[in-house]
Amino acid sequence: LDFELVLDEDGSVVDSSVVQGPMEFICGEKRVLPAIDSGIKGMVVGETRTIPLKGDTGFGARDVTKFLKVPMKNMPPEATVGSEVTVPGPNGNVLARVLKLGDRPDEAAIVDMNHPLAGLALTMNVRLLSCGSAPDADDDNDVESVAVETISPGDSKTFPKLGDRIRIQYIGQLADSGRIFESTRDDRGGGPSVAQKRGRGSEFRLGSIQGIAGFEIGLLKMSLGEQALLRIPSTLGYGSSGAGSTIPPNADLIFDVELLAIE
């Protein structure tokens, strides 16, 4: 799908395939927002549709129970009102937006753990570029074909799930040559990316943006704090099409990933 995500209030574009590249997924696997999964049913190649994203079929309502008080001593020194920070939460580190900062060290800051787009009225304009039969469950395109090799263990109990917002650091390489095509740890690479803030890592919601299937499959197997190598076959990467001049067709990929935070 080509797509454009628009804020209904003022028509501003929040995200688009111009920036991220086309969205590719298997219908019914719940790797995209429910409204998108149901909204494209019956489309033919070349057709365009407008899909409203509201409530639980979109990014959900803004939940005041996800406002959290954090002691100022636990706040990152670079935190400012409106910025996104990683702070200690009830079940480990979480990503949150700063709503208020305390004036003294013994006061608390207030942060918002809701998704940034929660509670907003949004519309996604989509155009179907191509479609085809989903791979059989018993072929090589299954979850087990993504190998996860732990470099440094996590807590072994806190695992992300679809819909969670996570923060990671990663380096993406071509398996055959070792050439780095993308990295959040420095300025190398520059190819297809889910990174939003280079240097601070990649922050995104699992299943809500386009990404290669194998990358998300591997992340779902990692626990909080873990660093691992994800070995992704081309069938769960960019496939026979590749990605421009950066990733050749039928290229197996390796990602060195560290899972920093889960919300």
Image (cartoon, rainbow, N blue to C red):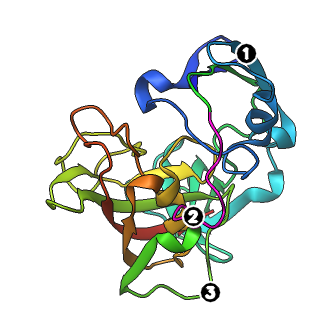
Q: Position of residue 252 (x, y in %)?
A: 32, 58
> Could you say which is closer to the camera, residue 40 or residue 191?
40
Residue type, mark 1 in image: Arg
- The numbered dot on residue 139 is 2
Q: Is residue 117 above or below residue 10?
A: below
Marks 2, 3: nearer the viewer: 2
Q: Position of residue 49 (x, y in %)?
A: 73, 15
Residue denoted by label 1: 49
The span shown in magenta is 132-142
Q: Is residue 224 left or right of 6 when viewed as pictured?
A: left
CA distance separating discs 2 and 3? 30 Å
Q: Is residue 192 left or right of 211 when viewed as pictured?
A: left
Residue 150 appears anywhere in the view: yes
Q: Secondary structure at mark 3?
A: loop
Marks 2, 1: nearer the viewer: 2
Residue 9 appears anywhere in the view: no
Residue denoted by label 3: 157
Q: Is residue 106 left or right of 260 when viewed as pictured?
A: right
Q: Residues within 10 Å of mark 2 (few under 14, many from 20)?
A: few
Q: Residue at x 45, y 69 (%)?
A: 260
Residue type, mark 3 in image: Lys
Q: Residue at x 49, y 30 (%)?
A: 22
Q: Secondary structure at mark 1?
A: strand
Q: Residue furthest right?
A: 55
Task: Determine whether label 2 and label 1 are within 8 Å by CB.
Answer: no
- The numbered dot on residue 123 is none
CA distance separating discs 1 and 3? 41 Å
